[in-house]
Amino acid sequence: MQPVNLLVDFDWSLTLTSPTDMDVTSAAASAPARSRLATRERLLESATRLFAERGLHRVTSHDIARNAGVAAGTFYLHFKDKSDVYRQILFSAIENLRAAVVEAVSKAATQRDALRARAEVIVDFAETNRDVVRILFSHDSETVAIEADVLTHLATGLEARFRREMAQGIFPSDLDPAATAQALVGMTARLIDWWTEDPRRAPREQILHTIVRLQMSGIRSDDHAGKDPQE
């Protein structure tokens, strides 16, 4: 059976920029445009810190602006509301993760190397973006729908890839693409959430090994493949 790959060749169709951002990027060479971009980055950094510390529910748009050192009205020149900036933080981070995975996998010589490279990128991302991970798995009642959208976005892209592989005859015939995509995204997301809450729970290398092993052969070793669990 072919190992099932995670986070490669996704269909990333979500637009990550709002209409107000388009004017900024189209004239990035001008001083006002650079200032606008810098202000937007300060707002994003401010929101990321506050969301990670307090959750979406306990943060207001005025809090974000104040913490960024700008007027409250400036916030609305860049974002519709606090949910808008929250969503953009998460989906932008996921896009950065996707790009890093694709680059790492493209350099791998073997399937196992690709799985290892992918796992390392995911774990590295979790380690260096703890605030984003805390935001994604904040369990805030106001963020449940957004968090579900992020995971659904990941699973939908992965499912599309599996269906292409199925048409090419290289996806395991006994697996359902939609169910497999949901299982892999859910497994990896939960593992990362559990580990980043307290990295002392398991060594980094064990997290990497777990991700690779489960995607290569499941929880049973090759010696026990095909045997009844009772044996």
Image (spheres, rainbow, N blue to C red):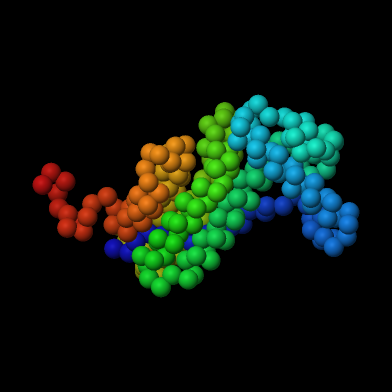
Q: On the image, which quarter does residue 112 sit in?
A: bottom left
132 w.r.t. 66: above or below: below
State the residue at coordinates (49%, 57%). Answer: 121
Q: On the picture, is 85 further left or further right than 191? A: right
Quadrant in which the N terminus is drawn:
bottom left
Q: On the picture, is 36 further left or further right than 172? A: right
Quick check: can you spot residue 153? Answer: no
Quick check: can you spot residue 39? Answer: yes
State the residue at coordinates (62%, 29%). Answer: 54
Q: On the image, which quarter does residue 163 sit in?
A: bottom left
Residue 122 x %, y %:
48, 53
Q: Residue furthest top?
A: 58
199 w.r.t. 217: above or below: above
Residue 93 x %, y %:
60, 50
Of residues 225 and 122, the one drawn nearer to the viewer in this rendering = 122
State the residue at coordinates (34%, 54%). Answer: 209
Residue 34 x %, y %:
83, 55
Residue 38 x %, y %:
79, 50
Q: Residue furthest left?
A: 231
Of residues 51 and 130, the one drawn nearer to the viewer in this rendering = 130
Q: Residue furthest bottom?
A: 109
State the residue at coordinates (79%, 58%). Answer: 25
Q: How many marks?
A: 0
